[in-house]
Amino acid sequence: MLPGLKHRLQQELISTVEKSEYYSNKIYSKEFKFHQPPCKENYVCWLGASIFGCTDAMNLRAMTRDQYLKSNGTIIKDWNDWL
């Protein structure tokens, strides 16, 4: 939602590919396209989270109330570590 962010990001990506030997040997395209979200940018994160919450994957990464109470205030592991 920041004015000019997409343009600046695109220019920095192009500049990095052109000037860096590491990337210039691996990325041959000088054109970058950005995805147009199906809604306004200010709630696209909410949309993605609500879609994820409706999937079966959420049940695999959720913690029950009993599991939380057994943790006794200890640090709860990040769901990325649960796999």
Image (tube, rainbow, N blue to C red):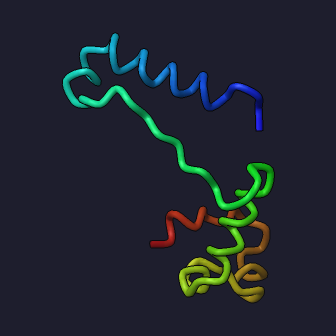
Q: Position of residue 33 (x, y in %)?
A: 47, 40
* Closer to us: 59 or 16: 16
Q: Nearer the viewer, residue 72 or 76?
A: 76
50 over 64 or under it: above or below: above
Disc tally is 0
Identify which residue, 34 or 20, lies in the foreground: 34
Q: Is residue 53 above or below residue 78?
A: below
Quarter of the image for residue 28 reads top left
Point out the image quarter for the N terminus.
Answer: top right
In percent of the image, x 52 and y 63: which residue is there? Answer: 80
Image location of residue 61, percent across then percent down: 58, 77
Work out whether 77 lies above or below 6: below
- Give the position of the C terminus as an image quadrant: bottom left
Q: Is residue 64 left or right of residue 18?
A: right
Give the image quarter of residue 23.
top left
Choose between 77 and 46: the one closer to the eye.
Answer: 46
Tell me: residue 48, above or below residue 60. Answer: above
Q: Position of residue 11 (x, y in %)?
A: 51, 20
Query: Hey, which residue is sitting farthest top in the picture?
Result: 19
> In the rendered view, does 27 fall on the left or right side of 8?
left
> Which residue corresponds to the image point at 33% horizontal and 15% vertical from the top-left?
18
Task: Report the residue at 71% width, 66% height from top.
Answer: 47
User: 77 left or right of 70?
Assistant: left
Please provide percent x and percent y for residue 46. Answer: 75, 63
Q: Quadrant of residue 54?
A: bottom right
Identify which residue is drawn at 54% across, 81% down.
57
